[in-house]
Image (cartoon, rainbow, N blue to C red):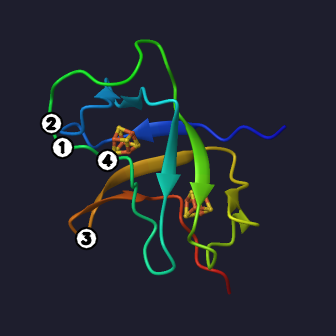
Amino acid sequence: MHHVLVTKCDVVDCCFNHNNKCRSVAIQVGDTEQPACDTFTKGRDHCGFDNMNAEVGACKTTHCSFNKDMLCNAQGINVGWKYEHAECLTFKPCE
Ligand code: SF4
Ligand code: SF4
């Protein structure tokens, strides 16, 4: 099975963020327009598991070149704040 990790996330005002890692179990990414992190939850309170490193669950941004059958096939993804959203920065539009 192919596990794709959230390698790094810079969205520190998400409660799942701890030292630029995501401690959710898995995040959901995107819609047909934008590769936003749908699991983003504003707040600095603790959520998620300590020592967890989230994987990418489903990704609905099918026009990303790493997307296959709504799953991510990148080596890992980086998430950051872009266009007023927590976004997958590894997103690469299909040619
Ligand atoms: S914005 Fe998304 S990837 Fe980043 S810590 Fe929050 S849930 Fe995890
Ligand atoms: S790299 Fe592409 S397929 Fe993977 S999560 Fe980001 S937008 Fe989705």
Tell me where residue 12 appears, x and y as whole percent.
22, 37
Tell me the residue at 62%/73% (across/down).
64
Give the residue type at disc 4. Answer: Phe
Can you tell which mark lies on residue 83?
Answer: 3
Alpha-carbon distance for marks 2 and 1?
4 Å
Tell me the residue at 55%/48% (across/down).
77
Question: Is label 1 within 8 A of ligand 1 (CB to nearest ligand atom)?
Answer: no
Residue extending furthest top?
50
Q: What element carries label 3?
A: loop
Alpha-carbon distance for marks 1 and 3?
16 Å
The image quadrant where one finds the N terminus is top right
Residue at mark 1:
42
Q: Confirm or deny contact between disc 4 and disc 1 (CB under 8 A).
A: yes
Residue at mark 4:
40
Residue at mark 2:
43
Give the residue type at disc 3. Answer: Tyr
Corner quadrant of residue 18: top left
Question: Crowding near pointer 2: few (<14 within 10 Å), some, many (20+)?
Answer: few
Circle nearer the N terminus (2, 3): 2
Alpha-carbon distance for marks 2 and 3?
19 Å
Q: Nearer the viewer, residue 22 or 41?
A: 41
